Image (tube, helix red, strand yellow):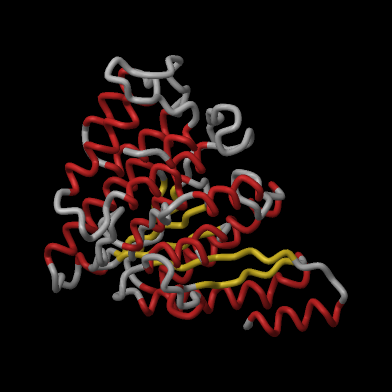
Amino acid sequence: MILLEILEMTTDMQTSYRIIKLTFCGPSDVQKELSIAREVVTEWNIQHGDALATMIKFQHWNTDSTPDMSERGQAVINRQLIDESEIVVAVFWGRFGTPTIFAGSGTEEEIRRSMARDTRVLLYFSLLEAVRAPQNSLQSEKVKAFRQEMFDAGLAATFQNRKAFERDFRTHLAKAIHELLAANKPTQRTGSTAARNKTQQKIVGDGNIQVGGNLSITVRTPAKEVSKYPKNSIGADADMTNYIEYLCDLWVKYMSPVEPNPDAAWARIGKSIKTKFRLRKKTRNHLSAGRFNDLVDFLVGEKLSATPVGKKHLRNGTKICRTFEEFCHGEM
């Protein structure tokens, strides 16, 4: 059922329908799974939409994203689809996908970003590669490594054939929708609209993280208490998601095409963060590792307090930023 038909139905019945946005992610070799997932969602809308006053809007970047040259392509997809979704379905088969600046593939970036935002992720891995020799062993090895990581992080699903995928996805979708409705989970993501708009207006970059694949897995990260920004930084209600996005934007700023040495760029960023903020020893060591994705994972799991250093200047005369917002807009 297309969105126009859903809207017409809503108007005719004078009923307020809840629209749940579901985005399908995956490399180019899961087109059949994409079609199956779309059909299952359409079936659910027909069978349960009226009774529950709920409709699922199925989204995929190839059909539902709008051209936008203001930022990198993956960032556009993240902003238009991933960040607005309440459910993300990711499937992997033999291919892992094309790398982005933040992850090994666009699908991986989408998955990790969704996990960091506590979006429900249904992640599936096809076992068809065990029967059919992979065409690209490097891609296959990346899928296997990512699959192991995801099984260690949460609950993922595998399927032996597409009939099994259709059956399992139908069951998993029904349960996921039931949980969303039972919890009455709001569509608005973490952080107020005002804080989010302010972030978009004052930061250069996109701050996107995505991931993709060919298999069915549900990866959940437990909700955790997050530390707030210092007063007058980016708003009293800003949370960990905004903090991570600021770091992402900062990273993009210094990963421009003219940057000849990414490691040197990271070193400048890491040194500035460590210099301008009082960080726990464990955090300082983590920053020294020089891997942005590790930093994001650390921030999500460990909670990083952005307490400004109390002195106005360092011994060498460098001015100390009083807030993280000031730090983002200051000289590196």
Residue that sits furthest to the right in the current view: 14
Q: Is residue 305 left or right of residue 317?
A: right
8 over 129 or under it: above or below: below
Measuring from the top left, give residue 240's x and y in whole percent. 50, 37
Quarter holding residue 92: bottom left
In the depicted view, which residue is nearer to us: 295 or 125?
A: 295
In the depicted view, which residue is nearer to us: 114 or 198?
A: 198
Is residue 225 visible in the rendered image? The answer is no
Quadrant of the frame with the C terminus: top left
Q: Residue at x 47, y 73 (%)?
A: 60
In the depicted view, which residue is nearer to us: 326 or 220?
A: 326
137 over 28 or under it: above or below: above
Measuring from the top left, give residue 153's x and y in whole percent. 36, 41
Is residue 183 visible in the rendered image? The answer is yes
248 over 127 or under it: above or below: above
Q: Residue at x 49, y 37 (%)?
A: 325
Q: Is residue 178 left or right of residue 256?
A: right
Measuring from the top left, give residue 278's x and y in whole percent. 39, 20
Q: Is residue 152 left or right of residue 56?
A: left
Residue that sits furthest to the front in the current view: 317
Quarter holding residue 257: bottom left
Quarter holding residue 76: bottom left
Q: Residue at x 61, y 44 (%)?
A: 191
Numbered marks: total = 0
